[in-house]
Amino acid sequence: MIENELTPRQIVEELDKYIIGQNAAKRAVAIALRNRVRRQHIPDDLRDEIIPKNILMIGPTGVGKTEIARRLANLSRAPFIKVEATKYTEVGYVGRDVESMIRDLVEISYRMVENEAFDEVWEESERAAEEKLLDMLAPEVPEHTQMTLTPIVGPALTPAEGDVEAQRARAEADERQRRRASRVREFTRARLEAGELEDEPVEIEVEEPSLQSMQIFSSAGMEEMGFNMQDMLGNIFPARKSKKKTTVREARRILTYQEAENLVDAQEVAREAVERVEQTGIVFIDEMDKVAGREGGHGPDVSREGVQRDILPIIEGSTVMTKYGPVQTNHILFVAAGAFHVSKPSDLIPELQGRFPLRVELSSLSEADFRRILIEPQNSLTKQYTALLLTEGITTDFREEGLAEIARLAQVVNERTENIGARRLYTLMERLLEDLSFEAPDIGEQQVIIDVGYVRDKLKDVVENVDLSRYVL
């Protein structure tokens, strides 16, 4: 049995907290996520034969396609990237090549693994940084301190006796100085732990960043890649360091990060990052419908079919070179989405259609859906605006009939103009509370009731004036 992982039902329940409706899409991504986990628990000889079933989500704008992708990233705890298909171009045209989505995914995975490694050594790093701060604020006295001795006044001593007396005096003076420095250091440590020295100025040594960026020409076209010159040239050129004056608070953060970097094996982090991408990586390609179509090789959209053909080998399974090593894309899950208003999924090239065997249609939102969106999600708009205005002392009371009227107006405006789905609620809510948000700092603490009369008064121009409705998104 698989333990400590979300079941498909639990994944859908988590998505329900933020997304209203679209149960078919939620179930599809939930099953896909669970299958990633299941694959990790089967024998090695069969594991490589199981490829992910890529998903194509079809639905109008503003119904939750992108939101499902965002929440999927939080739930998956796996390397995840969302890209727009429109920013890629066919090889030979100006723009990014499609392999850059995998490079970006590996970069995200590296940061994820690096942060986890930092968490494991952070306490040890904090202790080391604290000792370094102490060395700056109250340095320890070396074991053998050279001191200028005051001539001993008294009866004349033989040379041998004088040497012994001088050594004894030097040793006693050294011991007194060490005890004094130790007391000062402990006193400084106590003040440092109590936070009394946070704003004290200190000077620390920092390593100048060696990350450079350049344009390279690869088989996939022009691509901007970052590379670490220090890693490439090894220790031929030592890292440049500079002095930086800062506060104890900022110095602690910098020193802790430096100590964590020293304790973490960068090569092991890179290896683990590549492994995670290959086994559990997820790529969400939005606006897939914008590259659908089969042109005759002319016009401004000549590269659309070329983008599809470039994406195809990555989805089929290929090896992409990254600065952390080669990455095989055979088991990366691809989720594509598009409105497909003008084009349709069958306009994609047949080979690419076959690589998205699961197709999910997302339905348009109704007035009832709008009302639920305003109330039910954990991050609903009413909760967001209530929290924002509360910082000014304004308590907003959204009445049931007021929310129902906002939902009705959103449906009306969507029908009269372009249907932009739930995004219409953003513009209506902003227009509804525009005056209150502007005047909030001046009117003081009070309660504002948002009922049906308030809503109609603030939004009557938007509904009555069709031209203005078109202007308000």
Image: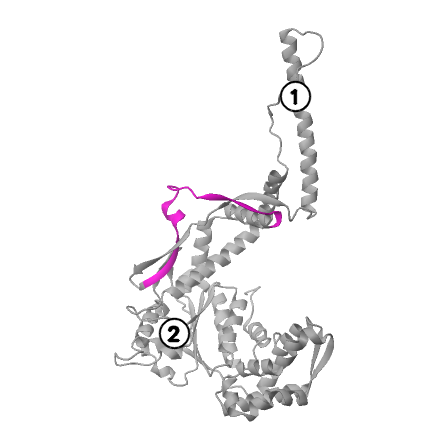
Q: Which residue appears farthest toward the front when viewing the image?
A: 442
Closer to the camera, 465 or 101? 465
Q: What residue appears at the point 60 percent right and 90 percent down from the top-left corner?
A: 460
Q: Position of residue 91 (x, y in %)?
A: 29, 68
Q: Is residue 110 magenta?
A: no
104 lies above or below 246: below
Q: Amino acid at mark 1?
A: Ala
Q: Nearer the viewer, residue 107 or 31?
A: 107
Disc 1 + disc 2, Cβ < 8 Å: no
Q: Is residue 190 left or right of residue 97?
A: right
* Residue 99 sits in quarter: bottom left
Up-down: is 129 above or below 469?
Answer: above
Is disc 1 surrounded by few (<14), some (14 to 19) or many (20+) residues within 10 Å?
Answer: some
Q: Calculate the distance from the C-alpha at mark 1 to the C-alpha at mark 2.
A: 77 Å
Can residue 287 be seen here? The reply is: yes
Say which mark, if any, is on residue 455. none
Q: Which mark is residue 171?
A: 1
Q: Residues within 10 Å of mark 2 (few under 14, many from 20)?
A: some
Front-most of 25 and 58?
Answer: 58
Q: Which residues are magenta?
A: 222-249
Residue 414 position, x and y percent, is 52, 88
- Asked if residue 4 lies left or right of residue 98, the reply is right
Work out whether mark 1 precedes mark 2 in sequence or the reverse, and give the earlier one. Answer: 2
Q: Secondary structure at mark 1?
A: helix
Residue of label 2 = 86
